[in-house]
Amino acid sequence: MAIDDVGLWCQIGRADYAGRPALFLDRDGVIVVDTRYLARSEDLRMIEGAAAAIARCNAMGIPVVVVTNQSGIARGYYEWDDFHAVQAALCHALAAAGAQLDAVLACAYHAEGLRPMRVADHPWRKPNPGMILTAGSRMSLDLSRSWIVGDRSHDLAAGMAAGLAGGTLLASDDAERQQARSLASAQFVVEIATNLADAVGGLIERRLFAKEEHS
């Protein structure tokens, strides 16, 4: 098990990630279909093209880090063991496509959770940047050249707060798009894409992880 405390999960690979930019990903709605409180491995459904997109990043040496809010645990809908089983199924599906995750961080804390996980505005819970900052510190990542992809504006808000270069929103909801675009600045680029495959393809095509683009 890789639980730091009752409400946090942190699992990091053993590779040397020092100085590299990373791709941070929300899980539900980005890599797997969002079934709302995904609690059973048998309910996991991969989003088309997501595994191949992660494999592209793996091949380029770009660490892929999942950062996911898991309030369903705090609410008592499922346990960390269930989360672990879903993650195992996800890793198996990725491996079948030649892909892997370099780190997974999760936060169960929520203001409406059951004690002891009833915590409002926990530093790790997105839109707060705690998961990203922890991964950055433990993996010695270059956050200034890193990127986040999510299906909610709060995913991008976490990336902005962590000092990432930018983020891509995968959402058709107009309100989410407007909230995401409001985060854009000279220091944080906001993009919109249909799915993870398109988002990653655009990032690679424009060499947004390359050092020479961020000197």
Image (tube, helix red, strand yellow):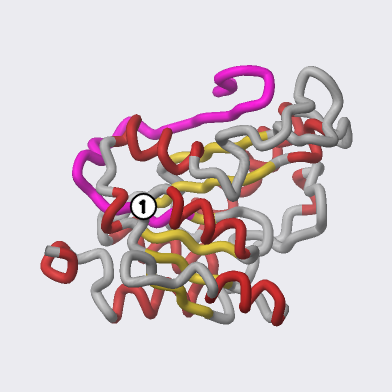
Which residue is at 78% across, 18% downward? 116
Q: Main secondary structure of the magenta part?
A: loop
Residue carrying label 1: 163
In the rendered image, the quadrant that contains the N terminus is top right
Q: Which residues are magenta?
A: 1-24
Instruction: Name the amino acid type tagged 1.
Output: Gly
Q: Is residue 153 left or right of residue 206?
A: right
Say whether residue 49 is visible: no
Q: Could you tell me which residue is drawn at 79 percent across and 28 percent down? A: 79
Splitting the image into 4 quarters, where does residue 211 fall? bottom left
Which percent across, then down, holds residue 7?
Answer: 67, 25
The answer to whether residue 3 is magenta is yes
In the rendered view, tell whether residue 1 sits above or below residue 193. Answer: above
Residue 62 visible in this rendered orientation of the protein:
yes
Q: Is residue 161 left or right of residue 92?
A: left
Magenta span contains residue 22: yes
